[in-house]
Image (cartoon, grey):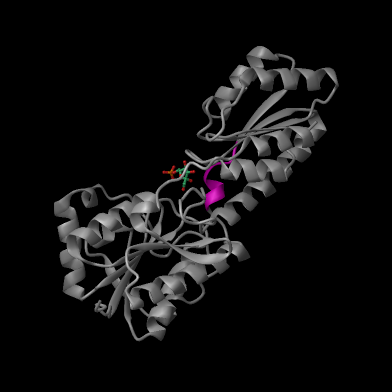
Amino acid sequence: MTIKKVTKIGVLTSGGDAPGMNAAIRAVVRTAIFHDLEVFGIMRGYAGMVENDIQELNSRSVANIIQRGGTILKTARCTEFYEYEGRLKAYNNLKEKGIDGLVIIGGDGSFKGAQRFSNEFDIPCIGLPGTIDKDIAGSDVTIGFDTAVNTAVEAIDKIRDTMDAHDRLFIVEVMGRDAGYIALHSGIATGAENILIPETKTDIEDLIFSLTEKEKRKKLVNLIVVAEGGEYGDANELAKIIKARIPSADTRVCILGHIQRGGAPSCEDRLIASHMGYYAVESLLIGRNNVMVGVVNNKIHYTPLDKAVKQKQKIGQEWMKIVKILAS
Ligand code: F6P
């Protein structure tokens, strides 16, 4: 098989931003330059590709960004790219600059777009999993999760102080429309009494029973961590149910929201982003195309882009059992 040599590559960030995306951009740019490739930053994800908002980057363009949250390339949703005409426009813009390879940092939706684009226009694409939700098949880790979960833990620890001072029941909502990893990890790490996640059914009667029983034992401080995509709706909905069933519980709600997406990336996120960014360029150079670079069992692992889909993990009953025992 002859490998079509890439000479100019584009890098973009797409979907929800995640801390560590800048570290990944830096790694892609500097590895590309090391190999004498030209490298272009595509602004606002696929939107910049369609609108020709593309700038050449050099080593200095990515100086002093490894520690910054957000993404210097910005990110956006682009409905035009869903249509063939939009993708054709994007292709013509790349062709005009001679860009013959792409690195896409984002989630499964971004990878789907990349796969389709690559099939249609024969531009090799490499995906890097960038999402705080950690829900992409083919990688044990995603860029941004570690920072997000630590942000959640720090916030919940603070809530615990005031919760304890007032003997309150707190329902803290963390991000995760389809995935409960942030809720599970932050809930366990902060000693939550209950954790509600989309992957596991919640027995609401069991939850009410355990809260009532704790109240009888005068255990009044109770922390419930709920993922935003929880079965019983958001934290406010859950609070309504609990207040109706246990009116005596002094209940408060705190929604952590987008604070979890920002901030300086953790050491772990900077490391995985740097590692993945390096291997993204190496992959393009050897013609290992249309894969997502992930990490499985602490080793770099490649998954075909069309298999790197949103993954509903079987976050087990085992963990839920442990949560209950430890919170008794
Ligand atoms: O990045 C993933 C995610 O944080 C989800 O957990 C959350 O539901 C969603 O993004 C929120 O997205 P938006 O920024 O569009 O509100």
What residue lies at 63% left-to-right and 46% top-to-bottom?
152
Provide residue 91's location: percent of width, then percent of height: 18, 64
What residue lies at 43% left-to-right and 50% top-to-bottom?
16
> Residue 73 sits in which quadrant?
bottom left
Q: Residue furthest front?
A: 1
Q: Quadrant of the C terminus?
A: top right
Provide residue 195's location: percent of width, then percent of height: 64, 34
Q: Is residue 168 above or below residue 68?
A: above
> Residue 102 sits in which quadrant?
bottom left
Provide residue 202's location: percent of width, then percent of height: 59, 26
Provide residue 15's location: percent of width, then percent of height: 39, 51
Q: Which residues are magenta?
A: 255-261
Q: Count numbered badges in the picture.
A: 0
Give the camera-side residue of 77 and 4: 4
Give the camera-side residue of 279 and 263: 279
Q: Quadrant of the N terminus?
A: bottom left
Q: Is residue 284 above or below residue 140?
A: below
Q: Is residue 217 above or below residue 273?
A: above
- Looking at the image, residue 123 sits to the left or right of residue 73; the answer is left
Q: Residue furthest right?
A: 217
- Reply yes or no: does residue 259 show up in magenta: yes
- Reply yes or no: does residue 40 show up in magenta: no
What residue lies at 62% left-to-right and 22% top-to-bottom?
203
Q: Can residue 50 be spotted in the picture?
A: no
Give the camera-side residue of 312 and 240: 312
Q: Can residue 231 be spotted in the picture?
A: yes
> Residue 304 sits in which quadrant?
bottom left
Q: Is residue 252 above or below residue 68?
A: above
Please, what is the dominant secondary structure of the magenta stretch? helix
